[in-house]
Image (cartoon, grey):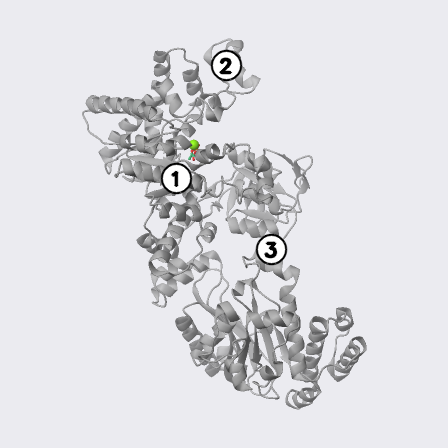
Amino acid sequence: MGAAVQKNPHTTLVTPDAPIDAATHGGRAKCLQRLVRLDLPVPRTVSLSFEAVKRIAVGQMPDIAAVDDQFPPDALLCVRPSSEDPDWGGPGAVLNIGMNDAQYARLSERLGPRAAAALYSRFVQGYATHVARLDPDLFDSEPAEGHKGLQRMLRAYEDEADEPFPQSRTDQLSGVLRSMARAWEGTSARLLRQAKGAPADAGLGLVVQEMIPGLGQGECGSGVLQLADPVTGLPQLTGRYLSQSQGREALGAGAAALYLEKDPRGPSLEELAPEAFEALKADAALMRRRLREEMQVEFVIQDGQVHILDGVRIPRSPRAAVRIAVRLAEDGVITPQEAVMRVDPHSLNELLHRQVAPDADRDVLAAGIGASPGAATGRIVFSATAAQASAARRENCILVRRETAPEDVRGMHAAVGVLTEKGGMTSHAAVIGRGLGLPCIVGASELTFNTRDKTLRAPDGRILREGDIVTIDGSSGQVLAGEPAMLEAALDDAFQTLMGWADAARDIGIRANADTPADAQTARNFDAQGIGLCRTEHMFFEPGRLTVMREMIFADTSSGRAAVLARLLPMQREDFIQLFRIMEGSPVCIRLFDPPLHEFLPASRSGQRELAEALDLPVSDVTRRIEAMAEYNPMLGLRGVRLGVTVPEIYEMQARAIFEATIEASRSGDPVVPEIMIPLVSAKREVELIKARVDAVAAAVRSERGRNFTYRLGVMVETPRAALRAAEIAPHVSFLSFGTNDLTQMTYGLSRDDAGRFMSDYVRKGVFPEDPFHVLDIDGVGELLKLGAERGRAANPDLTVSICGEHGGNPESIAFCREAGFDYVSCSPFRVPVARLAAAQLAIAEETGQKPG
Ligand code: PEP
Ligand code: MG
């Protein structure tokens, strides 16, 4: 019998060399085997494979008697779930299998009738409801006290089930295994684990273990211990112990439970049973070293002797995950590369978020549950579509919903924060918000949500409308009016160490898209290797500049335009000096002016009147000029390099500002080699024309200032034609940077500003696997990227190739770019650490075959 279980790959006795693997028997079974190998005092255990449990669910029972025979005849057993990844959960553990009348009599002698009756009643109650599936009310309603209560419970079972309570341990075990196997197959369990990332066909293993009761003479009890804090990851022995208890009772026992180490707050296990405590600590340290992980140890003390029942990876916050990985590596338990592989890049978001400054004034509108940390300010929108439209306008928005559903996810991606009326820490909004690193407040029912009227009413009567600015503090759960001062994320030493190791392994560059000195500072703080895209037009929207810009647009002649631009020149020069200084000699890639000029003109009548006043022109003139400039397809119209060719004064002014700033910034710091990027190119001739003008400006500045400098000129590949004709463009430039936002728009012929309206339908119906503006379309747009890079490089072997569209920070896109041999990716500053870590993991995976996780 024993041999049958030991050799059987599906009902397997856990021995040091049994054929047990996490992929066939689950993580718990594998971990128990490791503990057995370490010679730790683990009770006898039989592991049932995924395959065995699958068969049990459909009624094909393995030889349960053979399993049962592995254990001493009068032992009690417990069964626990063992899914491949412990995070996927599973049915609750069942303890005390084997309780029957004979055990009751025996335990009554050892523990006293009252304790024995409580144990037996609890088992009958659990078995009746979970295994025999009897009406729970019948068993809940009778608090079974002592012998009488137990008898009542057994009678109720017999009446309802039409048979006496099973006395055979084998029968009880069969019933428990069957009910747990079926529970795993149930729809709600399936959905729950899929939400945690489990594949549809994820298997469940079960482990049957001899129980060490934790009850009886001498020091007996159970508890849980861990050597690191799950929130901070700092080394700290935490846990609880409860005398005369089983399972995880100690954790729910409040004040009755003991501290483990001596503690001023109350009595401890260290004082109660010092030898057991020392043994336990040594076992835990051994587990940490040999399992190469911070483990939570479930233990029982029986008559002073320690038994280790189980070990699970300490569940941990992202902050703790970083510190734990770094400490394990610093202690020599794992390598720095392994530490890098153990942190999920997406989870870094939580460490990186901004917070409301502690000393800021808080105008609190209401409070809900802070479900995803960090604070964000934006305009209120009430639908996912409005959120996407807002993002397309590059306006930060807070998505307000009564609750969120999967069709809101795209809107959540587009928002900077989410606020819901309903829900708790595990509601859809909370789970998705945390996944995205998006500040999120749920359950804000103090606010009256009127989504039809698009208003929110605060308890003090204030009404908020769509477009109003609020701040949500996902850490405290407060909804604040307006925009309080913010504090950038604090990044601790463990984070810096991990990122240092990541950088040592990484083999693709990471830059940031940064338009303002503040963005550049964030990029610098996150150790971006330069700016990959500075969208200069944003600088013209600043107050004081917009009017000058409009004057320039209204100027009739080239010399008139040049005169107005001369007033913008010092402002631009100052912008660039600041960027260069902040970046301290790292490359800064400045994109020349890109949007249609029309975007700078007022659309409303009142705005046009104001402009007429400022320019001292009749309103009708202004209106007519604005109308004349309107385009049917402005994004395909007079913008980017087309403006550079037809209204050359703008690029000339910008080139001059860049060169003068270069000289200025190089005076006091590292020499600056600016990169100038031409947007929206589709033909070689465009590049030749702009290059000639920029070279001429450089020559003029050099001779005027008597100073030399170099610069690099490049093309932003945003039209399919530029990618296809890369071979003839590349010889004129030093770099090509793919702007995948416009390139996606033009490859699909899909408006990046309007596609949100039907994108969810398209994705739901499987037309697109994903929103291509969010996840790079490897098949189509990706092919253009590959073609462009190959053709460009063939024509100019020194060509630098990169990507600077929004996709640049996405780990999957980084994998693609790395594979295609790109020199760097550029992404928003807050994505830089995510990108650094993701890129490092790709390099380590390739070099060592390790998988992240
Ligand atoms: C792009 O088109 O990918 C890009 C980065 O430029 P913008 O988003 O400013 O059009
Ligand atoms: Mg673009």
The residue tagged with tag 1: helix, strand or loop? helix
Image-quadrant location for residue 639: top left
State the residue position of label 3. 426
Residue 496 picture location, percent across and down: 36, 53
Q: For the residue marked with disc 3, what is the amino acid?
A: Thr
Q: Residues within 10 Å of mark 3 (few under 14, many from 20)?
A: few
State the residue position of label 2. 628
Instruction: Give the residue at x 27% y 27%.
Output: 660
The answer to whether residue 629 is seen in the rendering is: yes
Q: CA distance from mark 2 to mark 1?
A: 37 Å
The answer to which of marks 3 and 1 sits earlier in the sequence is 3
Q: Is the residue marked 1 within 8 Å of ligand 1, measured from its CB?
A: no
User: In the image, is 202 to the left or to the right of 550?
Assistant: right
Q: Residue furthest right?
A: 159
Above or below, 294 relative to 600: below
Q: CA distance from mark 3 to mark 1?
A: 40 Å
Residue 168 picture location, percent across and down: 68, 84
State the residue position of label 1. 785
Placement of the C terminus among the 4 image quadrants: bottom left
The answer to which of marks 3 and 2 sits earlier in the sequence is 3
